[in-house]
Amino acid sequence: MLQCKHLIALAILCLFLFSSPIANATELTTNFDEAKEIAKQAYIFAYPMLENFKTMIIQAVDPGLFSMFYHKRSLRGPDYREVVRPNNDSIYSRLWLDLRSEPVVVSVPAVEDRYYSFEMIDMYTHNFAYVGTRATGTGARTFVISGPFWQGSTPSGVDDVFRSEGNFVLCLVRIAVDMEVEGDLEKVLAIQDEHEIQSLSSYLGEEAPPAADPTIFPTYDKTKAESAEFISYFNFLLGQLQIHPSEKDLTEQFGKIGIGPNLPFDVNAMPPGIREALEEGIQEALEIIESPGEIVGISKNGWNLSVFGNREEMQGEYELRAVAAYRSLYGNSLEEAYCPNGLVDADGDAFDGSRFNYVLSFNSDEVPAVEPKGFWSITMYGEDQFLVANEINRYSIGDRTDIKYEEDGSLVIYIQHESPGVDKESNWLPAPDGIFSLTMRLYLPSREVLDSLSCLVPVRKSETVDNVGKP
């Protein structure tokens, strides 16, 4: 009887291996522990790509907004719910690109009087290129953005060619605005209007190649993306990439659980034990991504710096890349903007505006330092990682706010739910009546800041707190 059961199990396994839609050149593992570990590592690798895909579906695929600038005409507020920990410092424009058919040519205006950046993000969430104040200067610029398979040469009149590793690219434009200066918003809106995009064939005056199929995108479902069915999304995305030579062996290892470029995947065809192993591995990956403690990034005095960068800077840093995508999707590279998250106070406790008032005190030599045209801010986020409504409509505070410094150049910022008093409201960052976190942003940070992390002073509970002990 036992032998018969073994023969039946073997027959089922053979059927899975040789006729399953997920079978491929890599032999599929039948070992529970191996499948679990591969699923864990594959999910950590894929997580930023899944988050990027989800956002692309919402912002570009469903509304049909590829190759079109979307200009936000005001600062983000509490009603913005698309990407966690949004910036409240600059006016945004975004541009999603589908480069399967051909490259595009983008022209941006000269921006001489303020901070400006044009960030290009690939499918891995690597920041593969920048144009703007730091990267290329303040002059006007015309450049080509191509996918990985374009073999053309630099066209006449083009300053740069930026090549992505994948067919889909997100471009984020950030233009600094000072809402306390009358007429400054109108200047920024005029800069937005000078951005232009056209296909390469249009720029060259040539016949356009056949259009790419707009119906290839699988429907996104969060439940599937957090289960073994994430493999179907991952396989689709891998099919839109030129897999980096350094990751070919890793991708082959992932193939032991049915992962590979454009491979069909049917979760129902998997042996029950292997599917269970994948689910356990994914849950372990999510626990690492969502609650990593201080095992990733740079931590000091309750601040944690999630690092973003290009392929070279992020090579092999898959866990770091995933946690960064979870905490601050589409963050800037460090030299462009230094953006640590304040997650706990000086005592290591989570921030809670229902129980404590807090102060952030900088000595004169600790006040955040930035290069010319740079600026800094501290932004408040609720427990859901979005901006929090408050009575004075202040969501961030920084060097463009009318803050008051002490005579010796030191600075105190009051972080609490209720007003600290009329005489201190200029330095008040309103907190919610509950759990919150902070993000400090230094655009064009000084080299001294990057070398010493001197601005990462701890946020302390106030010495005089009226609501301590509040249930």
Image: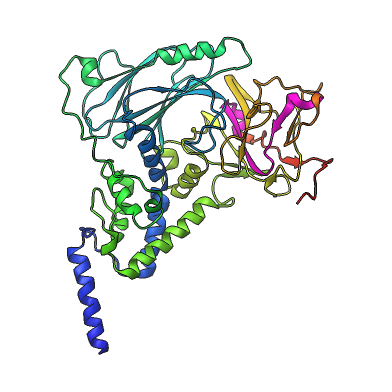
Answer left or right for 429 relative to 271: right
Between 384 and 6, the one nearer to me in the picture: 384
**With respect to residue 407, does 86 lie above or below?**
below
**With respect to residue 469, does 171 lie above or below?**
above
Image quarter of residue 258: bottom left
Q: Which residues are magenta?
A: 423-450
| Viewport quadrant of the N terminus | bottom left
User: Which residue is depicted at the point 76% across and 22% down?
Assistant: 404
User: Which residue is depicted at the point 34% across and 70% down?
Assistant: 273
Q: Is residue 366 visible?
A: no
What is the basis of the colouring in this image? rainbow
Image coords of residue 124 (percent x, y): 38, 41
Image coords of residue 245 (percent x, y): 30, 45
**With respect to residue 432, does 87 lie above or below?**
above
Between 195 and 166, the one nearer to me in the picture: 195
Between 66 and 199, the one nearer to me in the picture: 66
Image quarter of residue 256: bottom left
Answer left or right for 92 relative to 165: right
Image coords of residue 178 (percent x, y): 59, 17
Answer left or right for 412 relative to 161: right
**With respect to residue 21, does 388 lie above or below?**
above
- The mark tally for this picture is 0
**Is residue 1 within the magenta segment?**
no
Image coords of residue 290 (percent x, y): 52, 51
User: Which residue is depicted at the point 56% across and 29% down?
Assistant: 77
User: Which residue is depicted at the point 76% across and 40% down?
Assistant: 357
Q: Is residue 363 visible?
A: yes
